[in-house]
Image (cartoon, rainbow, N blue to C red):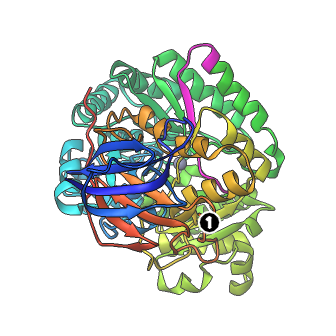
Amino acid sequence: MFDLIIKNARLIDGSGAPSFEGALAVKDGRIAKIWHGRPEETAEAAETFDAAGKVLSPGFIDIHCHSDETFYDYPTAESKILQGVTTDVGGNCGISLAPLRQEYKDLLRSYVGPAPYEWESFGEFLDYVETQVRPSENFACGVGHGAIRIAAMGFEPRKATAAEMEDMKAMLRASFDEGAYFLSSGLIYAPGTFADEEELTDLSRVAAQYGTFYATHMRNENLHIFDALPEAIRIAENSGASLQISHHKLIRREMWGRSTETLQLIEDARNRGVDAWADQYPYIASSTYYASNLPSWVYEGGVPALLARLADPVTRARILKETEEICHGRWGDIFLGYAKHPDDKKYIGKSTEEIAEMMGVTPAEACLSIVTRNGNDASEVNFGMCEEDVERIMQAPFVMTGSDGWCYGLDFPGKPHPRSYGAFPRVLGHYCRERGLFPLETAVHKMTGMPAKRMGFADRGLLKEGNWADLCVFDPQTIIDDPTYLDPCRPCSGIARVYVNGVLTAENGVHTGARSGQVLRRKY
Ligand SMILES: [Zn+2]
């Protein structure tokens, strides 16, 4: 007697292999049986679901997200579950919420945002997620270089001393021992931006010793990407660590079309034996902190120091001038996605150019006044990429899907980047079905089997007997990303059912309230 049988489905197993008509049975949270064609006559289940005309695939694995910043408020993770994601991978872009040292707790809170911070070690953080957050999705996490650097030396804008390096390496080892999956860096953000190549190579050696990867939000993704990408590749090559280029893209009109060259650099590295991969979100707009438009030196010492600089008229004038130079000609592309301060709610969804008009000041002035009121509690949506690059990168055989999004509810008060709600159906519906970039089996592989292998998940990401029953049942003719830039906080169409560890968690765009996710810990 099984708990569930899904029959008459087109099974796409996540490996990239051709689909087949069949059925699948679940027992005690795991895939108990897979049939080609019909289940045998004697097979019985507490529930049978007829999936005629639909695809049954593994639940999607979001290898690049930031849900570890938001799931305290949104444990049901509707933005993710309602697009078929069953496993979220946090700790990306150098930002993880552990390890943490109490003396820097307030600095970290001002930087990352409100989380409980009732932990110190990485293991304690995972325990907290497991017992207190209990999210609807499975959760795996990397350890951020920024987190261990803050724990070792705060937001100091200088080279780490030998003692600080040893301290960071010890924290990194402890985090791996306690279940962290990989090391990440975010080199446009403080304090990652203060680290040199040597520091990152030294730390990546620890990742190499553990046999895991170094994931990087590179130092630059626009005019200087041809310095930043070779740096990332050198760090992998010199440390022996495997490499994951995070959310690969080219921003700024001047760089459009040059993904042929960036992909070639990664391909060349692979041919030299570097285990290099990349992930990507399927949009021409990016999203980050609104304050990232300011020059990076203003972050020295963290957000309180940033606000103090903005309060000083002489320093503010310098910041204003440099911000205008950095963003000149692009203010019309930089939209306010979210701002915490009540006075700024009316600007959400507007470009900085429009906001400036409403305020009656220059765009750089408008930008600074929003940062002054919100610190890091404001985000932007920035239209800087072109479709040609997005599609070319997506088709590369070493590129997988990752939303770079957050888990939110449908009631999130703002217009965040729609990638948090629609990245996966957008690849399946728009890029696969409408644009015909690749077969459906390839699209599914990029969001299931490929990231599972990358993460070392032995029993997820494939439809295989014995694996956990993380499942997505969707209609390949109708699946699409309804969430848009103007109306992002919505479910996606075409997803009939989502199961997490065998538990029905969403049905036809409605969350069931189930919270059956597991916290995953890597064992080395
Ligand atoms: Zn990033």
Range covered by the magenta-colored residues: 270-283
Question: Would residue 308 appear left or right of 315 to someone viewing this image?
Answer: left
**Magenta span has 151?**
no
Q: Position of residue 468 (x, y in %)?
A: 30, 45
Residue 462 x %, y %: 41, 40
Secondary element type, mark 1: loop
**Which residue is rendered at x = 50% and y = 65% of the image?**
495
At horizontal 47% and vertical 43% (from top left) the residue drawn is 448
Judge left or right: residue 403 versus residue 293: left
Q: Quadrant of residue 273?
A: top right
| Placement of 254 over or under 229, stated as above or below | below
Write down the residue under mark 1: 478
Q: Residue at x 75, y 83 (%)?
A: 357
Query: Residue at the spot x=46%, y=18% of the render?
Result: 239
Indicate yes or no whether the magenta region holds residue 274. Answer: yes
Report the quarter where the C terminus lies. Answer: top left
| Residue 296 image point, x, y percent | 57, 50
Please, what is the three-letter code of the amino acid marked with disc 1?
Thr
Q: Position of residue 428 (x, y in %)?
A: 61, 54
Foreground: 419 or 293? Answer: 419
